[in-house]
Image (cartoon, grey):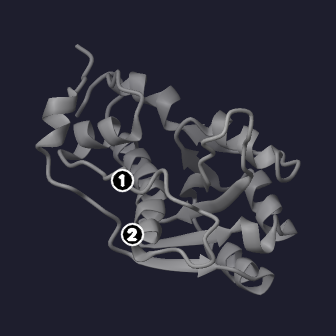
Amino acid sequence: MNATITKEELEILPVEAFEGKIIVIQTEKEAKKAIEFLKKFDAVGFDTETKPSFKKGTTNKVALLQLATLEYCFLFRLNFIGFPDVLKEFLSNPDVKKIGLSVKDDFGSMRRRENIVPRSFIDIQEIAPKYCIEEKSLQKIFALLFGKKISKNQRLSNWENDILTDAQKKYAATDAWACCKIYQAFQQMTVGSLR
């Protein structure tokens, strides 16, 4: 039987958030250092944030790109540094898996900023059904696996702010880290069971 969770069941779960080190990247030099570190991993969590647009027909460019391990999360401020070559190369690197959710949407957003050839991306929505998980949202998949919920209350905040708030940083880091944590859990499970 496939696993699902209701909104009501989700509501009563305790909140989980990334507790590791969050590093904000605002220069190319910092980006190079971060990528050197991330290249050592087999898989990293991936996500992006874009300032919401409340005007019909107006879309903003991706402002933030997050890459996370289980202990570290790097927040690349694309609205400050553009798309450095070192970051483009990393997203095309076939040796490091990038784990995200609904990654095709992220690719579409990133291409509005830079032409990128993404390689070795794994979409949690595509692999969750193999483990009998019917849900599509990161929040619900995380809840089914870990019995905790991740907060979504910063999603519609302004990601182009000069300075990100601590709440924004925590939210952005948690999403990328959660993708990494979910993938790691799947690696330890048997295909066809939520065990």
Q: Nearer the viewer, residue 17 or 194?
A: 17
- Work out which quarter of the rendered image holds the C terminus and state it: top left
Q: Residue at x 47, y 70 (%)?
A: 169
> Residue 41: which quarter of the image?
bottom right
Q: Residue at x 57, y 52 (%)?
A: 47
- Binning the other alpha carbons within 10 Å of mark 2 as few (below 14), some (14 to 19) or many (20 upward) gives few
- The residue beneath circle 1 is 153
**Up-down relation of residue 146 to residue 195 (above or below):** below
Tag 1 and tag 2, C-beta contact below 8 Å: yes
What label does residue 80 carry, if any? none
**Up-down relation of residue 178 to residue 186 (above or below):** below
What label does residue 167 carry, if any? 2
Image coordinates for residue 95, horizontal then vertical, percent: 70, 55
- Gap between marks 1 and 2 measured at Cα: 9 Å
Q: Nearer the viewer, residue 11 or 16?
A: 11
Q: Is residue 60 left or right of residue 125?
A: right
Q: Is residue 186 left or right of residue 55?
A: left
The three-letter code of the residue at mark 2 reads: Ala
Mark 1: secondary structure: loop
- Binning the other alpha carbons within 10 Å of mark 1 as few (below 14), some (14 to 19) or many (20 upward) gives few
> First in sequence: mark 1 or mark 2?
1
